[in-house]
Image (cartoon, rainbow, N blue to C red):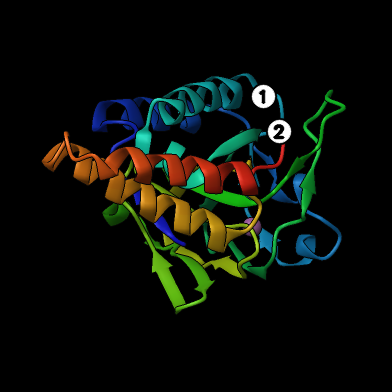
Amino acid sequence: MLLHIPGLFDADETARIRAALEQTDWADGKITAGYQSAKAKHNLQLPEGHALAKEIGAALIERLWRNPRFMSAALPHKVFPPLINCYREGGNFDFHIDNALRQPQGSHERVRTDLSSTLFLSEPDSYDGGELVIQDTYGVQQVKLGAGDLVLYPGTSLHKVNPVTRGTRYAAFFWTQSLVREDSQRTLLFEMDNAIQQLTADVPDHPALVQLTGTYHNLLRRWIEV
Ligand code: NI
């Protein structure tokens, strides 16, 4: 499932973030790439643990944890702290699949990358190219969202970032280990939760809601891994 979560940051917030990112020093994006993806990766990145990356990352995670759509779709168990990248002057990242496991710097705990997220920080008309291209079960999707919007997609998918031929594309990205490993099971639970929320709004006293909500939790209990 590919999910668009709009408006996590507003226009003023993304403008302030971009202003800070324009002033900072960048490293080669290959620092966090695996052996094979390093050959495909041509962009800039803030080093892991960079103060600005930590600040933006913490704000992003806090917003997501209060976002019912993200919580319902991702069923997050743990996350790899968000990284910040920058594509300009032809920068691109050719087709690859992300590494299955990530270990945050200074941590013993590893994160299985069930889900990938990209938060767009630049307005789409301020740069050319830079689409996130994701090979989904339904074909190829091209994603280029407004500043402050996020896309959530399965970590198992083949994806790339098209070359940025004008302007600068800033983004934050991170991985989530879900309580439910399989995308198909997570998608079923998300659709069921949406239906329950809608029924709760429209017919709050219907007795079948108790049964339906119970079934949601019983499926979740069956599939959950902690
Ligand atoms: Ni990737």
Quadrant housing the C terminus:
top right
Q: Tell which quarter ligand 1 is in.
A: bottom right
**Position of residue 164 in the picture relative to residue 116 (left or right):** left
Q: Position of residue 3 (x, y in %)?
A: 40, 55
**Picture residue at 56% right of the left edge, 28% below the top:** 24
**Picture residue at 41% right of the left edge, 70% below the top:** 142
**Position of residue 131 in the picture relative to residue 84 (left or right):** left
In the foreground, 94 or 87: 94
**Picture residue at 63% right of the left edge, 34% below the top:** 77
Q: Amino acid at mark 2?
A: Pro
Q: Position of residue 199 (x, y in %)?
A: 20, 45
Reading the image, the residue beneath label 2 is 47
In this view, which residue lies farthest toward the bottom? 139
Cα separation, mark 2 vs mark 1, equals: 5 Å
Give neighbour class at mark 2: few <14, some 14-19, many 20+ (Cα, 10 Å).
some
Reading the image, the residue beneath label 1 is 50
Q: Is residue 187 visible?
A: yes
Which element type, helix, strand or loop, lies under badge 2?
loop
Q: Amino acid at mark 1?
A: His
In the foreground, 84 or 104: 104
Q: Is disc 2 in contact with disc 1, using a CB cutoff of under 8 Å? A: yes
Give neighbour class at mark 1: few <14, some 14-19, many 20+ (Cα, 10 Å).
some
**Picture residue at 17% right of the left edge, 35% below the top:** 204
Q: Is residue 6 visible?
A: no
**Position of residue 128 in the picture relative to residue 164 (left or right):** left
